[in-house]
Image (spheres, grey):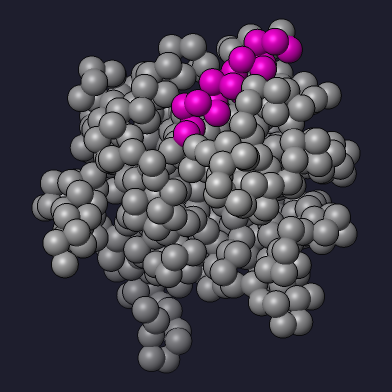
């Protein structure tokens, strides 16, 4: 993408229609953001500062949670260790317990993990897919023991099995029963935990595996389509559950590309929900997203430079209209982040929020010849991927076909 002379002009967005292609913030097609006031000081709200943390034992992670909340973090995000992500206990022969995340084997671990944290006031995100139903059940049981009604719980369970088959490979069951478990959690959450996001449809791991921004966007939305289809086949009304689906995107170094990607994502999802699924509730059309700065962009050489990378990526996420953000720590490429590095990462978000002026206006780049042209280019290219996936029968069928091809080689 890009032009030879590097200059964008009105002709580069010929046919551009404000109402159809851009619209007001908080209105279809939501390119300018899902909310009317977004982050503005008067009437709006800042994005959730949700730092990802998992630190060996439940006790150590609880200590890190309290530290982050004490420093102004506004949401929790749990990083689980590898055995937990695969559904193993810490005493299994796996041998990686408490490394690169927290070990959760029992309900007691969950109780320790959230000890002293009021789950009625703090939203919690849990990045786990294959055993998501079981871990969420333990979280709900702990909330019940705290005396917090399910109706007051806010948060997200990743629960995105398709991206495991695409990229992260932390799947346990075949695709069909895995999809059934996903739909089970959506159905339960819709009926019993109405403020909970029952799936975080994740492009982050797809991008970290080497996908381009366009591929990340297309595959993430194709996964979203597959989940909606699964729930509708079950007999659920699309407007009963669609507003509690959330998304998760990776934010890399190409500043304007990442901004345009998030704007295109919202516009595409609104069209998908309205045109393909006939959603009537405006909330069903809104793509709400968590973003994380790009772990794969960090370097072990001169790690202090990672602070600059993360700051630029975080600003791109904010200008792109994210609802929630994790900023990576400068030293995490070397090991579990130090307390100082975690604090700098959180302060990066706070400086953007309170010192950069981003809360003064909504979607300040709207109408830029370059941004609007780039948003259109990204959307057009992503639709081509989605058409190819549709032609193969959808994402679940595409992944099953790919798996068979690998087994036959």
Residue 342 percent location from the top left of the image:
80, 56
**Residue range of the region highlighted in magenta in the rendering:** 131-146
- Quarter of the N terminus within the rendering: bottom left
Q: Does the magenta stretch include residue 127?
A: no
Tell me: 72 left or right of 168. right
Residue 34 visible in the current orientation: no
Q: Is residue 187 left or right of residue 341?
A: left
**Residue 130, relative to residue 319: is it above or below?**
above
Q: Nearer the viewer, residue 232 or 84?
A: 84
Q: In this orientation, which residue lies closer to the viewer: 325 or 409?
A: 409
Residue furthest bottom in the image: 5
Residue at 34% x, 63% y: name it.
Answer: 215
Report x, y in % for residue 123. Answer: 66, 30
The x and y percentages for residue 125 are 61, 36
**Residue 393 seen:** yes
Q: In this view, does 193 lie to the left or right of 168?
A: right
| Residue 159 to residue 162: above or below | above
Q: In this view, does 70 lie to the left or right of 90?
A: right
Give the overall secondary structure of the magenta segment: helix
Total numbered circles: 0
Rendering coords of residue 143 (x, y %): 67, 16
């Amino acid at each position: 993408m890009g032009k030879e002379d590097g200059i964008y002009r009105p002709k580069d967005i010929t046919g551009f229609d404000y109402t159809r292609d851009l619209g007001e913030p908080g209105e279809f097609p939501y390119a300018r953001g899902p909310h009317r006031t977004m982050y503005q000081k008067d009437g709006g709200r800042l994005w959730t500062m949700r730092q990802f943390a998992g630190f060996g034992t439940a006790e150590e992670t609880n200590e890190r949670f309290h530290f982050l909340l004490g420093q102004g973090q506004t949401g929790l995000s749990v990083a689980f260790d590898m055995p937990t992500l695969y559904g193993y206990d810490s005493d299994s022969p796996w041998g990686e317990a408490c490394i690169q995340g927290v070990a959760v084997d029992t309900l007691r671990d969950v109780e320790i993990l959230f000890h002293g944290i009021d789950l009625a006031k703090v939203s919690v995100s849990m990045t786990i897919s294959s055993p998501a139903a079981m871990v969420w059940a333990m979280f709900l049981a702990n909330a019940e023991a705290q005396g917090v009604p399910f109706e007051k719980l806010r948060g997200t369970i990743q629960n995105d099995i398709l991206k495991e088959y695409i990229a992260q490979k932390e799947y346990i069951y075949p695709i069909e029963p895995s999809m059934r478990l996903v739909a089970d959690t959506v159905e339960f959450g819709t009926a019993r935990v109405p403020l909970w996001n029952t799936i975080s449809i994740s492009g982050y791991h797809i991008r970290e595996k080497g996908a381009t921004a366009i591929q990340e966007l297309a595959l993430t939305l194709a996964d979203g389509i597959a989940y909606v289809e699964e729930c509708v086949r079950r007999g659920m009304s699309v407007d009963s559950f669609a507003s509690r689906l959330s998304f998760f995107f990776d934010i890399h170094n190409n500043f304007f590309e990442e901004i345009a990607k998030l704007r295109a994502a919202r516009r595409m999802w609104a069209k998908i929900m309205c045109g393909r699924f006939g959603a009537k509730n405006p909330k069903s059309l809104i793509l709400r997203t968590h973003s994380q700065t790009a772990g794969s962009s960090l370097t072990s050489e001169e790690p202090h430079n990672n602070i600059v990378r993360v700051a630029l990526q975080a600003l791109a996420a904010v200008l792109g209209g994210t609802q929630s953000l994790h900023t990576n720590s400068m030293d995490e490429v070397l090991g579990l982040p130090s307390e100082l590095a975690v604090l700098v990462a959180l302060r990066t978000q706070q400086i953007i929020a309170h010192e950069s002026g981003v809360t003064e206006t909504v979607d300040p780049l709207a109408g830029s010849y370059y941004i609007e042209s780039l948003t259109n280019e990204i959307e057009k290219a992503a639709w081509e991927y989605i058409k190819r996936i549709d032609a193969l029968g959808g994402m679940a069928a595409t992944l099953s076909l790919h798996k068979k091809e690998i087994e036959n080689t």
